[in-house]
Image (cartoon, rainbow, N blue to C red):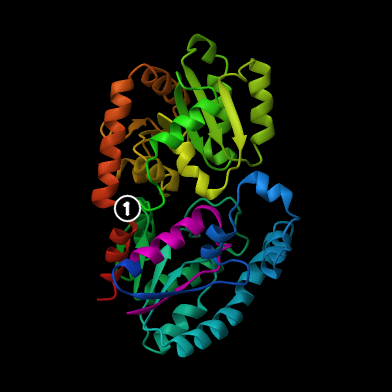
Amino acid sequence: MNILFHHRTRGRGAEGVHIRGVVKGLRELGNKVSILSLPGADPEEELVTSKPQQQQAEKPAAKKSLFSRLAELTKHTPEFVFELFELAFNVLAWWRLRKTVKEQQIEFVYERYSLFMFASVWWAKRHNIPIVLEINDSCLVHRVRELFFQRFARSIEKWIFSNATGLVFISSRFQQVAQDAYPNMAPSVISPNAADLDQFIIDDAAALALRKQLAVEDKVVVGYVGAFVHWHGIDWFVDLIAERLKDYPNIVLLLVGDGVCYQSIKQRIADAGAEQQIIMPGRVAHDQVPTYLSAMDFGILPDSNDYGSPMKLFEFMAMGKGMVAPDFTPIAEVVADGETSWLFKANDRESCVEKVLSLSSQVEQQQQVGQQARAYIERERQWRHNAEQLLTLVK
C-alpha cells in the first residue's frame, strides 16, 4: 500500500522517535511510506543531523528553518493568537495534502492528530481516501498549554473523531475518555508506544567503557533519560533522594538530558554534597543514548500522567533494563510488576524513593527483570506490532 504519514509537529524528541518507528513498522510490512512534514520538521532528518555535543560545539550553529523560527515565536504569543494560527494552518494542510496525494498516488493517510486540524479528514473523506488518526493530544485531557477556544476546539474534535476512518489511542484510559465524550466516535484501537530493536542494541563492551569513564564500575547505576521538566518529576525525585544517598554509597544516579529544571536540580545536588553520586552529563546525541542505557542497571520514571505512554519506558526495557515507574493505567497496562519492571503507587513520592533504594541491593532481580523486559519488547512491542494494529482499521 502507498501510505502518507502526515504531521504538524516539530518532528524532534519523543514525537520524532514515534513517527520514525511507525513509519519503519509500516515499511517492514511491505508498504511504501512517505512523510509529509513542514520544512525543518522531517523526523528522519534528526538521525542524520544528530551529532555528539563536542562535534556540535566545533561547528557554527545551523540556521533555523522558517518553521523553527515560527515555532519559537508561538511560545511567546497569547494563547488565542496561537490557536488562530492553528486554525489558519488548515489552508496550508489542505493544499499540501491534496498536492502530495495526487503526485505520489497515495492510497491511505496516517496522521498524527493536532488540535484544530480538520482539513485533512474533510478532504480525505470527500475523496474516499481512508485516513486514520493517531491520538496523542486532545482537548479532553490535561494540557500544559490551556486552551482559549475550549468549546470550539471540542466541537471540531468531535467532528474529526467521528469522521475519520479510524483512531489509534496510546492507552485504554485515553480511549475511554474520548468514547465517553464522543459516543459516535470512529472505530479505534489501543496501541502503546514501542521500541526499535535495531536502534537499541545491547553493547556490554560499550557499557563497560562508559562505566569506567564515569568511574562507576563497582556501583549500582540508576538511570534517567529525558527532559528535565516538572511533569516528569525528576526534580522532586532528586530533592527527596539527594540527602539519603550518603547512606547508600553503592548507588549512583546517572541523569541524562536537559531542560528548565536542569540548573535547579544541579544546585540541589551541590547543596546536598551529592556530586559524587549524582552524575548529570547533559543532553547526549541520539545515537549515544543506547550506550548510556547499557551502562545503567535499572531506570527511574518518577512521574507521568493517566493517559500517556512514556517512550523511555519502552526504550529502557528494549535495552534489558527494568524501570521503577508509577502505576498509572497506561504504564500498568504494559508492565508486569516485578517481572518486566517495578511499579509504585502513582503520586506516592516516598514510595518511589524507597523502591529505588531497596532495589539497589537486589542485583539478581535487576538482571532477571531486565531480561524479561527485553523479551516482552521482542514479543509484543516492536513498531511492526503497532503498524499491524493500525492497518486493521483500514482493512
Q: Residue 118 location, x and y as percent?
A: 50, 76
Residue lying furthest top: 247
The magenta stretch spans which residues?
1-25
User: Can residue 227 be seen here?
Assistant: yes
Q: Is residue 150 left or right of residue 310?
A: right
Instruction: Examine the rendered structure and indicate whether residue 146 appears above or below residue 84.
Output: above
Q: What residue is drawn where x is 68% and y is 30%?
A: 264
Quarter occupied by residue 299: top left
For the residue pair 180 and 20, the one nearer the viewer reads as 20
User: Which residue is located at x 49 percent, y 28 percent?
Assistant: 211
Measured along the vertical axis of the image, is residue 111 above or below residue 263?
below
Residue 163, percent across and down?
38, 77
Q: Quadrant of residue 314?
A: top left
Tell me where residue 272 sits by quadrant.
top right
Identify which residue, 259 or 114, lies in the foreground.
259
> Quadrant of the image for the C terminus?
bottom left
Residue at left 43%, top 49%?
Answer: 308
SS state under label 1: helix
Q: Nearer the viewer, residue 236 or 4?
A: 4
Count of labels shown?
Answer: 1
The amino acid pointed to by label 1 is: Ser
Query: Residue tagged by mark 1?
Result: 172
When the figure is inspected, residue 95 is found, relative to residue 328, above or below; the finding is: below
- The question of residue 16 being in magenta is answered with yes
Q: Is residue 181 visible?
A: no
The residue drawn where x is 59% and y is 39% is 228
Give neighbour class at mark 1: few <14, some 14-19, many 20+ (Cα, 10 Å). Answer: some
Q: Position of residue 59 (x, y in %)?
A: 73, 53
Q: Position of residue 205 (x, y in %)?
A: 42, 35
Asked whether residue 222 is drawn in magenta, I would say no
